[in-house]
Amino acid sequence: MAGKGIQDLVGQVMIDKEFLADLVQDPARVLAGFDLTGDERIVVQHTLEKLVRERAGNGASAKLTNPVNIGIGVK
């Protein structure tokens, strides 16, 4: 049986806000649990960076929240 791939990662992100928060805060640790190609890892990391930049708007930081404050990202 193959390991968890990109479809599993995307599915988990869509249904689990805590997982997304962990992914944003420590992508290397979270991605270690998935069997991704080098290109897939790059796409995931670039997408996360883009989301944080968009969330920050014109400011220098982005407050990432769910029902509990999960952290602050800095450009």
Image: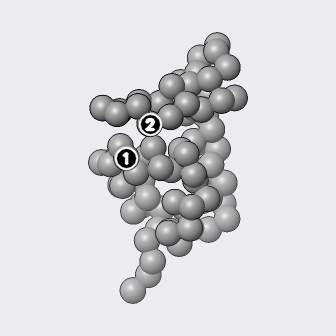
Residue 41 x, y percent position in the rendering: 62, 58
Q: Quadrant of the N terminus?
A: bottom left
Residue at 64% of width from left, 13% of height from top? 58
Amino acid type, mark 1? Glu
Residue 53 x, y percent position in the rendering: 62, 28
Quick check: 70 above or below 53? below
Camera sees residue 73: yes
Q: How many marks?
A: 2
N-term-proximal mark, 2 vs 1: 1
Q: Which colour style is shown?
A: one colour
Quick check: 54 above or below 27? above
Is mark 2 in CB contact (under 8 Å) with mark 1? Answer: yes
Which residue is the site of mark 1? 18
Camera sees residue 54: no
Quick check: 74 above or below 56? below
Residue at 35% of width from left, 43% of height from top? 17
Which residue is at the front of the view, 37 or 54?
Answer: 54
Give the quadrant of residue 68. top left
Quick check: 45 above or below 36? above
Other residues around mark 1 within 10 Å, as few (<14) / some (14–19) / many (≥20): some
Which residue is the site of mark 2? 70
